[in-house]
Amino acid sequence: MNQYRNLSIISLFLLFIIIDTLLIGYINKVKEQHLNFLSSSSEKEAVTLFDNISISRAWNSNFDGVYVKQTGNLQPNPYLPNNHIYSKENELLIKINHAWMTRQLSELSKLTNKHTFKLTSLNPINPNNKPSAFDVKALNYFEKNPNKLYYTQRAKDYSNLNFMGVLKSDNSCMQCHVTQNYKEGDIVGGISITLPLEEYQIQYRDILNNHQRMIFIVVFISILLFIAILIVIHLFFKTHLQLKENVNQLEQLTQDNDTLIIRYKYAIEGSQSGIWDWDLVKDEIYFDENWKKMLGYETHELKNDFKEWDLRVHPDDKDKAIQDIVENQQHKTDFYLNVHRLRHKDGHWVWILDRGKTYFNEQNQATRMVGFHTDITQFKELEIDLYEKEQNLMNAQRIAHMGHWRYNATNDSFFISRALYTILGIKDTIKINSYRDLSVLVHSDDLNDFLNKHHEAINHRKKTSLQYKIINPITKKIHYIEEHISFFHDTRINEENFMGTMQDITSIKNIEKELELFKQIIDDSPISILITDAKANIIYANKYFTKVSGYTKDEIVGKNPRVLNSGETSLQEYKQMWETLQNKQNWSGVFKNLTKNKEAYWESALIIPIINENEQITNYLGIKREITKEIYLQKELKEKEDLMLIQSKNAAMGEMISMIAHQWRQPITIISMIANNILADVELEIFDTVNAKNAAIELSKQTQYLSQTIEDFRNFFKQDKLPEETDFNEIFSDISSIISASLKNNNIEFSTNYDESIRCKTYKRDIEQILINLIKNSKEAFLDANQSQNQYIKIDVQEEADFISIKVYDNAGGIEKETLEKIFNPYFTTKEAQNGTGLGLYMSKTIAQKHLKGNLTARNYDQGVMFELTLQKFL
C-alpha cells in the first residue's frame, strides 16, 4: 500500500511540474504580447505625428510657402529668396516654407508636448538641420531600403522613441534642392521625431511587475494545491485501509453468524448503496435490488449481466473504470475504487462511488469481485456547482479589477479577499484588521470623505457608495477606487455583517479624461466638424462651425446640412457624393455655402462614413476647412499670372521681330539681286525670256518663303485650346523655321538628339514657346560673353515611363550661383531695363508646371548651363 501511495505522490509532483511549466510559458507569452502592443502603440503614435507634420508640410508646399506676420521669436528663413515682404499696412510678413514651418512647429512642440522633430538629410541645405547619429543611421537604412517608409529606435527601458519617416522628392523639393539633382521620387531626407515615452515606460514596468507577480502566484498556488492533494491522498489510503479492515470483519461475521449477514444487509439498504457480485470463473454477475433501484429500474427490468453496466456507463468515464477493475484483478491494487457516471432510466446521469475487492484462489487467480455502488450525485453536483461559482466569481473579479471585504459586527472580525490585496497593491502577508486600516492608502484629498462615509454606513446600517483615490504603496501611482457597502442581518445565527466591494476604475477614469480631452480638442479645433446620423441629420457641431456658419448648436442640431446649400453645387455632384458615401468610401470636395445671414463662403470638405461591426453605416463625420480667402487669393493669383503671361507674350513678340529680320535678310537680298539683274539685262538690251522665266520662278520661291515665315510666326502666338498628339519632328521643325537663321548669323551651332518614334499628347505650342525662350537666352549669353568660337546649343530628348525629359545645353560660360537661384523669380533679370522684362523664365516655369504638368529646372555643367524641361507624356 505504501508503494502505491509513494508512486501516486511522485506522479502528482511530476504533473504539477508540467502544469507549472505550461502556465509560466503562457505568462511569458502574454508578457511578450503586452510588450509588442506597447511597441506597436508607440510606433503608431510616432507615425500619427509624422503624418500630421507631413500633411502640414504638404499643405505649405502646395502654396510654395506662405507669408505670415512676424510675431514673438519667429524669424525669416535666411535660406529662402524673397523671405519677407511688407503688406499694404506696412506690416512685415515672413515667408515660411515647409522646412522652416516644420522647424517652428518643432520648437513649439518641444515646449508643450516635449516632442521634438526636424527635417534633415545626409546633405542638408540648412546647417541647423544637420543629422544626428540616429538620423544618419535611419537615412542610410532608407538608402538601402528605398521601399521602407519608417525607421524606429526605442530605448530598452521605454524612456523614449527615436523615429524617422522618409521624405521623397516632389516638385516642391526640387525647387529648393536644384543643385542636388534630385529626381521625383528620390529619397531626399526624412522627418526625425523624438518621442518621450513616460506613460509607456510606466506600463512597461507594470508589465514586468505583473509578470513576476503572476509567476509567484502560479508557484504559490501550485504548492498549496500539491499540499492539499497530498492530504487527500493520505486520507484516501487511510480510508481504503479502513474499508479493507471492515470487509475482513464482514467476512468473519458472515462465517460466524447468519444474523450478522441480515444486519449487514439492513445496513447496506439504509446507506442507499447497491451490491454487485461478479463470479469471474463463470463470468456471472449479480446486481441486488438497491443497485437497480438506484438507476430507476425494478428488479425484473434489468438482467444480471455485465452488459447492463457496460451499456450505461458514461463514455468519458468508461476506460478509467475498466482500467481500475483490471488493475485490481491483476493484484496491482488492494482495493478497487472508482467514481463514474451511469445513465438513469429517465436519461439523466447518476454519479456513482464504486468500491470493491477481488478475491483470489490458492493459485493466486482472480475468482470473484464484490463491491458497492453508492449514489453521490447530490454531493458531486454541489461540488461542481461550488467550483463553477468560485471560478465565475474569481474570473468576474479579475476581469472587473474588483475585490471585496467582509466585516462581522457581531464578533468584530474583518476579512479581505486576495483580489483586493492585488488591487490595493499590498502583500497578503500584511494583516488588515479593520476598514480603518485601509485608510492609510487613501489620498489625502479624499481621506475625510472616506472615513465619514464608512462611519455612516457602519453606524447606521445603510447602503453607501463612494469614489476616492488611493496611492499604491509599491508603485506610488494613484488609482481610482469605486466602493459599494451593503449591510445584511443573518437571522439564523443572529449575526450582523457588512460587505464592501471595491473596484479599480483607474482605466475608466483615464478613458473619461481622454474622452473629455478629445471632445475639447474637437470642439476647439480651428476647422468645422459635423457628425450626422445615418439619415444625414446633424447630431453634433463644434464651435468653429457655429462661428463660420452663424448658426448656434441648438439651431443646427437636428437639421440637414443642406440648409447651408448656396445652390451653386450641381445635382450631379451631390449624386456622385452620395454614391461614394453609400459605397462606404470617403468623399472629398469643395462647397460654396451660405451662412445664416446668406453670406457666401467656401469650404473644403472631407466626409467619412462611420461603419459598425455589422458593416452598416451609422453616422457620417464631416471635416471642413474654410477656404474663402484661399479661393479669392487663387483667383487674384490667376489674374496676375494671366497679366504676366500677356506681358511675356508682348515682350516675346518684340523679340520675334528681330528674328523675322534674320529670317528675311537672305530672301530679300536674293530678291534684290534678281531685280537688279533683270534691270541690267533690259538696259544692255540683252533681255532673255528664258532667263526672265527662271528669275520669276526664283522670285516666287523667295516670296513663298517670306509668306511661310510670317505664317510660322503667326502660328507661334496662337494658344492651343486642347492637348494634341505630336512628335518632336514637328516641334523642332517649327522651332527651326523661327530661330535657325538668327543662330546661323551669330555662328551658333544648333543640334538635336531625339528618337523620332517618341510621341506625346500635350500643348505643343507651350513646349515650343519654352524651348525658343531657352534658346534665345543661350544666344544672348554668347553675345554678352563676346564668345565667337565653338559656340553650340544642344537639345537632348529622353523618354521615361510617364514623362519626357528635354535637356537644353550650351557652352556660354554658365550662370553665377547667386543668380542661378533667382532666375525663375518674376521680374528678375540680369539684362538692361530696355532689353529684358524678367518674365521669360518665370512664365516658362509656370507654363511647365501648370500646363504641361511638369517642371523646369537649371544647373551649371562644364562650361555652360543645362535647362531641363520635364512634361507629362499624355495629358
Image (cartoon, grey):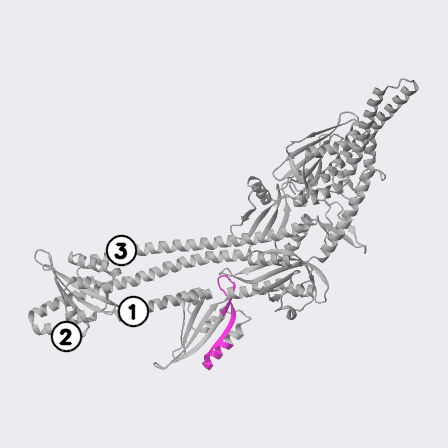
Which of the pair 242/640 is nearer the observer? 640
The image quadrant where one finds the N terminus is bottom left
- Circle 2 — which element? helix
Tag 1 residue:
381
In percent of width and height, residue 542 lies at 64, 65
Q: Is residue 159 visible?
A: no
Q: Residue, x 68% and y 37% (percent of image)?
A: 726
Q: In the image, what residue type sits under mark 2?
A: Tyr
Side of 283 relative to 530 (left or right) = left
| Front: mark 2 or 3 | 2
Residue lying at the far right in this picture: please name it. 683
Name the N-terminal-most of marks 2 and 3: 3
Tag 2 residue:
266
Q: In the image, what residue type sits under mark 1?
A: Glu
Q: Which mark is residue 10?
A: 3
- 111 to 818, vertically: above or below: below
